[in-house]
Image (tube, grey):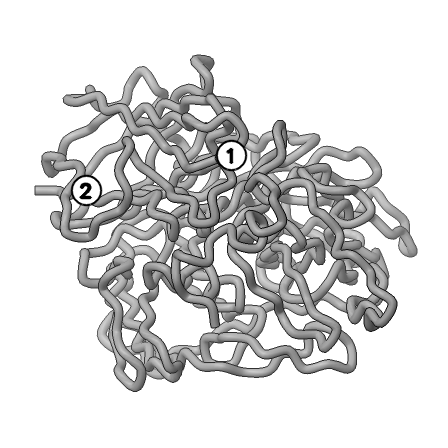
Amino acid sequence: MITRRSVLGGAVAAAGLPLLAPGTFAGGEAHAAQAGPHRAPDPVPPAFSTAMPVPPVLRPLASTGGVDLYELTIRAAKAHILPGRATDVLTYDGHFPGPVIHARSGRRVLVRHRNGLDMPVSVHLHGASVPPSSDGNPMDVFAPGDSRTYVYTNRQPHASLWFHDHAHHMEAEHVYRGLTGSYLLTDDLEQSLPLPKGRYDVPITIRDARFDENGQLVYTMADRNRTTILANGRPTPYFQVAARKYRFRLLNGSNLRLFALSLSDGTPLTQIGSDGGLLERPVAVPVLTLSPGERADVVVDFSRHPVGTKLVLTNSGPGKPEQVGKVLRFDVVRTAEDHSSVPKVLRELPPAAALARAAVTRDIELSMDEDGRPDPRGFVNGRMFDPDRIDTTVAFGSSEIWNVTNANKRAAHNFHLHLVQFRVLERGGKPAGPTEAGLKDTVRVMPGETVKLHVTFDAFRGDYVYHCHMLDHSAMGMMATFRVR
């Protein structure tokens, strides 16, 4: 398995191509592999020929004293992603797509991971407010054969979180090969709302991939040939629904690709949540943009469609439409009672003007080499990641303004801050739009763009990282450490 930064961009640079074509996003326009005279048939089936599974919900090993205990083994497995073929993947307890853990605010969760691989790992609960010992720092790994127990205090409101490997230089490949899972945190507020629940509340992870003629995942850093779109681990599948409302918890689980999602009949998606839980009010979104690591909860009402309707979730993001333009298809197959609804007000958040006064304003610059070199580097404020260096020190309990700028001309980035949920105040000097008005932990930053964030550090003291969540970029060095003291 490729695990070193020295391979970054190798395939692209060897072909004499820039890492990104001018005017495209990271993970953008795909270049189809050249077909040779002996090229084997494409193992990827036609669109909508396989069913999308619902990820399995894990049951705790024990639930006592206000604590739920889970045990998972990180191990290699074989998954039936493509019909008639077994694909080698990396998993949490053999599950591909990754499993779901249900948690509740105020109730602790302990997850004991055993490393059944032949390389070190680190598990990061993305979006969670946790002590440093359970954050899954890229350098805080545990070795093959060892175990590590992560303690999640869940001292935060409801949120659609996810967990994934974060071992530095290996995170990109490990996530690509399957080391992801969902962690759905709820609370009394969320449970009191009449939103779709139970079987009508469905997590969906979307991502891209590339397979060889034997149906095996092909991994190369900065690969732009990942043109097979997976939804919950299946290629462009169908999902049977009833003619009623559904809540879909969408996660962009790609390494690099940005998605721009919409429904084929032109009906807007009703977005009700983002990274850190529910928005204040539902938003009708004609096109929903998600960069890697971002989440959005949407409600789709299929009751307006007769049984027999087939509705496609499309992608107008970077890439050729014939390759990446279809994500999955919803097939309306039955009627069903529906007592759910989407309230006009979902929660209350303080307006930007009422947020705590910022004691400090910081400028954070993300950049990477764009000159086609075989070993491109990533930078935060002009420096590559050094685990022995503290780049930023913040005072516990303080609020700050972080202006995050993408200094590149072609490459898109995004920005993920461990430990906290922040508020996006501005994008490009203009107030943030309604889809970014909630709590966030990951935000896209396009070439030349600046986003203004309000961050409060009032949860835990210790060392954490911030980085581009286009994982190839963080593995290049686009990551830094901050200390809360």
* Horizontal arrangement in the rendering, residue 258 relative to residue 391 (left or right): right
| Label 1 – label 2 distance at C-alpha | 23 Å
Q: Quadrant of residue 88?
A: bottom right
Identify whether 429 is placed above or below 315: above
Q: Earlier in the sequence, mark 1 or mark 2?
A: 1
Q: Quadrant of residue 331?
A: bottom right
Which of labels 1 and 2 is toward the front?
1
* Horizontal arrangement in the rendering, residue 275 relative to residue 421 (left or right): right
Determine the secondary structure under disc 1. Answer: loop
Number of numbered discs overlaid on the protein picture: 2
Q: Looking at the image, which residue is at 57% across and 39% down?
A: 18
Between 83 and 231, the one lying in front of the other is: 83
Q: Which percent across, then down, holds residue 362?
A: 23, 24
Q: Is residue 452 something that shows in the picture? A: yes
- Residue named by callout 1: 412
Q: Which mark is residue 260?
A: none
- Residue named by callout 2: 482
The crowd level at tag 2 (other Cα within 10 Å; few <14, some 14-19, many 20+) is: some
Q: Looking at the image, which residue is at 49% across and 75% down?
A: 91
Q: Quadrant of residue 348?
A: top left
**Amino acid on which the number 1 mark rests in the picture:** Ala
Q: Which percent across, then down, holds residue 395?
A: 10, 35
* Horizontal arrangement in the rendering, residue 212 relative to residue 309 (left or right): left
Q: Which percent across, then down, holds residue 222?
A: 54, 50
Residue farthest to the left, as pictured? 485
Between 384 and 396, the one lying in front of the other is: 384
Q: Does the CB distance between marks 1 and 2 fall below 8 Å?
A: no
In what quadrant of the picture does the C terminus appear? top left
Identify whether 89 is placed above or below 104: below
**Amino acid on which the number 2 mark rests in the picture:** Phe
Identify whether 53 is placed above or below 255: below
Determine the secondary structure under disc 2. Answer: strand
